[in-house]
Image (cartoon, helix red, strand yellow):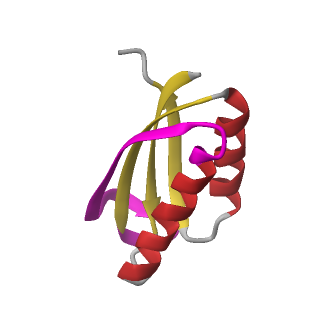
Amino acid sequence: MRKYEVMYIIRPDVEQENVQALVEKFNGIISNGGEVTKTDVIGKRRLAYEINKLRDGYFVLVHFNATTEVVNELDRIMKISDEVIRSLIVRDVA
């Protein structure tokens, strides 16, 4: 297993309890074959530029250890999720 980190932005019109449910959903996908080492819900922030006419979003940063199959599945689920505006998964080299 390798170390990864994922940063994703959730739409600003999602309720706070639904944001927490989404974070738990994505952490559950990671835990199914990997392990979450740190989850940081940064909160609602202003975007640098508009994305789909949205100016704000809930930022979440997750550090985890997983196999490439888990990373591919997480990326696929995030891309088809309507609540996620943007996501980026990178390998942690440190």
- The quarter holding residue 57 reads bottom left
Q: Nearer the viewer, residue 89 or 40?
A: 40
Looking at the image, residue 30 lies above or below residue 41: above
Indicate the position of residue 69 as horizontal and vertical percent values: 73, 33
Query: Relative to residue 43, is residue 4 depicted above or below?
Result: above
Stretch of the chain drawn in magenta: 30-56
Q: How many marks?
A: 0
Q: Residue at x 57, y 55 (%)?
A: 28
Which secondary structure class fits the magenta region best?
Answer: strand
Q: Quadrant of the N terminus?
A: top right
Q: Where does the image place residue 27, in percent across and percent down from the top left?
A: 52, 53
Residue 71, image x and y in percent? 64, 37
- Against 42, residue 58 (above or below) is below
Q: Is residue 68 left or right of residue 53?
A: right
One can see residue 53 in this view = no
| Left-right relation of 79 to 49 | right
Q: What residue do we see at 35% from left, 58% from top?
A: 59
| Residue drawn where x is 46% and y is 62% of the image | 23
Which of the image's four quarters has the C terminus? Answer: top left
